[in-house]
Image (tube, rainbow, N blue to C red):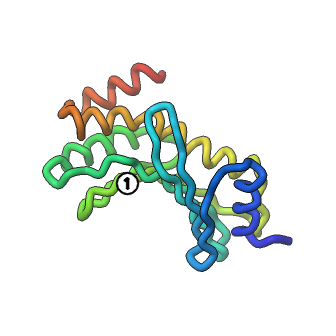
């Protein structure tokens, strides 16, 4: 049976999605174009315990002076999310969204990986405008998240 990492890279090969596999680090990187913008996805494959972690790296670094406001957007967006969470690195301002799953054994179905990727990209597509409104346009965090939630509910 192929390794978990080989299963992940085979999935992207079958889907004909351009990606870069780094076997030594257990990472697969690929660009993604959503409705709200473009960002990079990093899939981390852990062999023991077997798990897949998908990170969407948001294209908007949080400037130091805005990190408390961006942190509020993170908290408001995370509230009630059934799968995954936004993360903000308070030291460098990196924003990302993480979804993950543990696997029984090292068998990965294409449906499970698709669901993980879809949840990740759909959530970023939904909330990227709220982050952009706060970082680029100076909007209030509560209003930015409420606007997104109202348009996607």
Q: Position of residue 1 (x, y in %)?
A: 86, 71
Residue 53 seen in this snapshot: no
- Which residue is label 1 attached to? 87
Q: Is residue 62 above or below residue 153?
A: below
Which corner quadrant of the image does residue 118 belong to? top right
Horizontal side of 74 relative to 118 (left or right) equals: left
Q: Position of residue 61 (x, y in %)?
A: 29, 51
Q: Is residue 45 above or below residue 79?
A: below
Q: Position of residue 29 (x, y in %)?
A: 56, 60
**How many marks overall?**
1
Residue 115 seen in this snapshot: yes
Q: Residue placed farthest to the bottom in the image?
A: 24
Residue at figure coordinates x 48%, y 22% from the top left: 153
Q: Is residue 17 above or below residue 29?
A: above
Residue at figure coordinates x 13%, y 50% from the top left: 65
Q: Secondary structure at mark 1?
A: strand
Q: Position of residue 126 (x, y in %)?
A: 45, 33
Residue at figure coordinates x 40%, y 20% from the top left: 150
């Amino acid at each position: 049976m192929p390794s978990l990492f080989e299963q992940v890279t085979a999935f992207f090969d079958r889907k004909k999605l351009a990606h870069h596999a780094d076997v030594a680090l257990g990472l697969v990187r690929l660009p993604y174009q959503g409705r709200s913008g473009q960002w990079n996805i990093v899939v981390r494959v852990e062999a023991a315990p077997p798990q897949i972690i998908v990170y969407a790296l948001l294209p908007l670094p949080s400037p130091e002076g805005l990190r408390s406001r961006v942190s509020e957007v993170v908290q408001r967006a995370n509230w009630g999310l059934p799968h995954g969470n936004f993360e903000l690195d308070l030291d460098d301002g990196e924003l990302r969204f993480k979804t993950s799953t543990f696997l029984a054994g090292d068998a990965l179905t294409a449906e499970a990986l698709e669901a993980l990727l879809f949840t990740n990209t759909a959530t970023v597509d939904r909330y990227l405008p709220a982050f952009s409104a706060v970082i680029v346009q100076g909007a209030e965090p509560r209003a930015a998240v409420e606007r997104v939630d109202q348009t996607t509910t």
